[in-house]
Amino acid sequence: MAQQDDVFKKIVSHAKEYGFVFPSSEIYDGLSAVYDYGQNGVELKNNIKRYWWDAMTLLHENIVGIDSAIFMHPTIWKASGHVDAFNDPLIDNRDSKKRYRADVLIEEDLAKLDDKVEKEVAKARKRFGETFDEALFRETNPRIAQILAEKTELTERFAKAMNDNNLEELRQIIIDREIVCPISGTRNWTEVRQFNLMFKTEMGSTADGAMGVYLRPETAQGIFVNFLNVQKTGRMRIPFGIAQIGKAFRNEIVARQFIFRMREFEQMEMQFFVRPGEELTWFQTWKEFRLKWHKALGLGDEKYRYHDHEKLAHYANAATDIEFQMPFGFKEVEGIHSRTNFDLSQHEKFSGKNIKYFDPELNESYTPYVIETSIGVDRMFLSVLCSSYEEQQLEGGEKRVVLHLPAPLAPVKCAVMPLVKKDGLPEKAREIVNELKFDFSTHYDEKDSIGKRYRRQDAIGTPFCITVDHQTLEDNTVTLRHRDSMEQSRVNIDDLHKLIHDSVSINSLLRKLK
Ligand code: ATP
């Protein structure tokens, strides 16, 4: 674990050193849980967004996008339940003065029980060697049965406490489980309190006071309140979806782990409207499609898992998270929720407007059911960054840090380098840049030794380096160096465009989804 913490620290400082992510307002000592994206970060982030947007809107003729405002009528948040229930239960440790989310402390305790099971399995595997039947062991081992029973009991108690909004019981679970503060190591806990996560501000200045408005805590409501606008003007027929990418704001109690939990972040959400009764089939379809989208990036299939929710929000009838193996454990990157007709019905009730869909095939009107896929851009960014980072020991004692970013997401696609700064090589290199730049983000670099220039590109994940040397002037060929294998091949300048395009286009990812 300590080693993983170490790696994570290195990734965070690498992200800063190479212009991916900076702490916000750094010259004023920063602003907690707010970050800025630098010159490379913004490109990586835009590429992630492009991949998502195109996977939704290009590949599905029944999904369209919108871009709704961050400020919305305050009653929207009453209708959605956020004013009354968008709370996190918080608890303080009196000794360390640190604040925690009570539910997260308990979830971490639950995860420890899973770890215990895995440890038992690993021990047995070692003991039995090749004859080990893991499935049988998991089913029949009494120690595992005991841990799983403990887990079921705790899960049920926790779910009930959360559903009943029973804050005393949450505290009691923390006490009974002997959960300690990781900083002070003590169990000197305060009571549990509810804390609303929405940021509030004021709009306008009228004589009788300004109107209190919220910074949206999710982008989804902008889609729901535009349901009829899009359906009518786009002549959409159910089933259809509306996608949106945009900022969301949450006054998180505990903001840790870099860009994993931010107070200002970005979401990519798609609400898919379906006939009542068909939602669970669609839920399954979207669950599978979304995992496929993740896996197409090639970060490693074993790094993903579903986490089906045992505790469902009152309006949901199915929910799952796609979790990714971060250096600090498997964590939620995306949520897929079957939200029933809750949101549209609530807006119908609170606005007094009819928000029904007339289904010409059934010849009846109804409030559509909704499947939501909701993914955080920043968490996605973090998962890509963490799984791409590698410190490599090279032959001859040299070291390099390389980001094995999926080529279509890389901020810079190719760097063109004259071997030396004379003999017409820089001019030739510029010529190549001036041709490639229309299609690919291309760097020109002539400073330092070629080795150093390669390292700089490796560190930001550039898939291709193109070196122009004296032979180039004679036969129009260059060396093309591949980031991951470091292999170099001699290619004709006329072939560069196709070679690069085939591996860096978002299109190549999208084709894996069909
Ligand atoms: P968590 O349980 O981690 O707080 P959540 O279940 O509240 O997350 P959702 O409301 O389902 O999250 O939001 C959908 C997605 O938005 C999440 O899967 C995550 O990727 C992203 N997200 C949510 N909160 C944050 C945050 N504070 N910082 C960055 N991304 C976030």
Image (cartoon, helix red, strand yellow):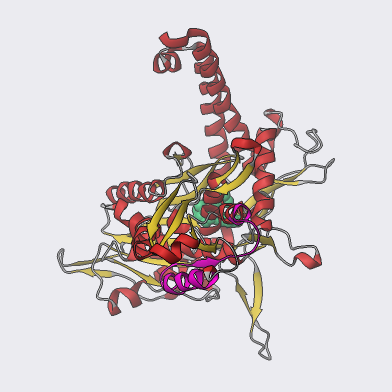
**Rendered residue at 65%/36% (across/down):** 397
Q: Which of the image's four quarters has the N terminus? A: top right
Of the pair 234 and 206, the residue shown nearer to us: 234
Left or right of residue 130, residue 110 in this image: right
Looking at the image, the residue that sits furthest to the bottom is 207
Q: Quadrant of residue 224?
A: bottom left
Tell me what residue is drawn at x 45 percent, y 74 percent.
Answer: 67
Is residue 63 depicted above or below 90 in this figure?
A: below
Query: x%, y% of residue 45?
Result: 52, 62
Q: Is residue 228 above or below residue 171?
A: below
Tell me residue 358's x, y (percent). Answer: 23, 70
> Does 433 appear in magenta?
yes
Q: Seen in the image, is 478 located left or right of residue 10?
A: left
Q: In the image shown, does 257 or 145 lie closer to the viewer?
A: 257
Return the residue nearer the eye: 374 or 290.
290
Vertical comparison of 321 with 472: above or below: above
Q: Quadrant of ligand 1?
A: bottom right
Out of 122 and 488, give the one closest to the viewer: 488
Q: Residue at x 58, y 23 (%)?
A: 116
* The residue stretch that appears in magenta: 426-453
Outermost right residue: 95
Count of picture labels = 0
Specify the quadrant of the image occupied by residue 508. bottom left
At which x and y percent is residue 503? 38, 55
Q: Is residue 246 visible?
A: no
